[in-house]
Image (cartoon, helix red, strand yellow):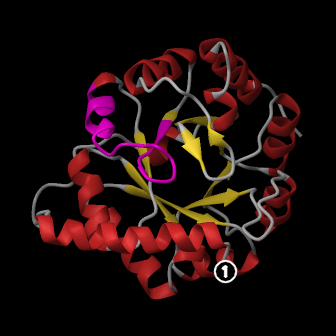
Amino acid sequence: MHSILSKILEQKKEEVGKLYESGVQAVEGQPPNSGRDFKGALSSEGRVSLIAEIKYASPSAGVIREEVDTVTIGRTYEKAGASAISLVTDRLFFRGRSADLPILKGAVTLPILRKEFIIDRIQVTESCLLGADAVLLIAAALSRDVLEALITFSSSLGMAAITEVHDREDLEKAKDCRAEIIGINNRNLKTFEVSVDNTLALVPHVPEGCIIVSESGIQGGEDVSRLKGAGIDAILVGTGLMKSRDMDQSTRELVQDCNRGGG
C-alpha cells in the first residue's frame, strides 16, 4: 500500500472516532435513503456514462482548482450531459467538504457519489444522512469481511457502492464480496503512474453482469473509444474537467465522446 494511502487511512481512523463521539445516529429501520438511481444512471445501453467529479486538490496533483463553488460546478456538469456526479469530501488531503454534499444534492437532479475513504459503517451512515446516492469502497483499504459488510450495509440504506480495485488481487476480493459495481482505478498505488491499460487488462476478469467504471487518467476520445470497445459502462473523470478553463465545453465534448461508437 502506498504511503500516502496509509496516511489517509490513519487520518480516517481519527475521523471515525470523532463521528462516534458526536453521536451520528444509525438509520436502520427507517425507510431507505430517498435517493436517486446511481446504478441505473450507469446502465445506458450503447453509450458510456460520464461520472463527472468535483475535486479541488489531491496529494499527487496538488491544488487543482482554486475557486470552491460546488453548486455551480455541479450544475455545469448536469447541463453538459453528465450522468452522475462524484463529490470528493475528504478535507485534509483533497480540500473537500462533507457539508457540500446536501447542498449539491438540493441543487442538481443527478445521482451523487460520495468519494471518501470509508473504513467503517458509521461513515456509510453519515453518507446516507448527507444524501449520498452511492459510496466508494476501496478494496485495497479493507479486509474481505469488512468490504462485504459495507457493501451490504450500503445497500440496506438505499445506496449503491462502487468497489474500487487496482489489480487482480483487489478484483478477486471484490468478486468474493459479490460487488455489483466495479471501479477500476488506472493509478498504480505503488508508483502513482496512470494508464487506462490497467482497465483494459482487468476487464476480461470482471464477472458478467457487473457494471464497470474506469477511473483516472482518461484524456478524451481515443481513451473513451478504447474503453468502450473493451466493454466498460462508465468513466469517472475529475482532474481533467476541474482544470479546464471552459468546464462546460470540456464536459460536453467528453459526453460526445461517450456517445460515439467505440471499439
Above or below residue 130? Residue 21 is: below
* Region of the chain picked out in magenta, as a range: 85-106
Q: Residue at x 72, y 30 (%)?
A: 258
**Left or right of 133 on screen, residue 167:** right
Task: Return the residue nearer the eye: 151 or 18.
Answer: 18
Asked which secondary structure carries label 1, the reply is helix
Quadrant holding the N terminus: bottom right
Residue 43 percent across, percent down from the top left: 56, 43
Q: Is residue 102 magenta?
A: yes
The answer to whether residue 28 of the structure is visible from this angle is no
Task: Return the residue nearer the eye: 199 or 217.
Answer: 217
Residue 214 percent across, percent down from the top left: 70, 50
Q: Give the mark count.
A: 1
Above or below residue 131? Residue 188 is: below
Quarter assignment of residue 20 = bottom left
Q: Please, what is the three-letter code of the amino acid marked with disc 1?
A: Glu
Task: Return the residue nearer the eye: 71 or 224.
Answer: 71
Above or below residue 135? Residue 4 is: below
Residue 114 percent across, percent down from the top left: 41, 49
Quarter assignment of residue 209 = bottom right
Residue 77 percent across, percent down from the top left: 52, 22
Q: Which residue is mark 1?
A: 172
Q: Residue at x 24, y 62 (%)?
A: 125
Above or below residue 195? Residue 176 is: below
Q: Residue at x 49, y 23 (%)?
A: 67
**Badge 1: residue crowd in 10 Å (few <14, some 14–19, many ≥20):** some
Q: Is residue 69 magenta?
A: no
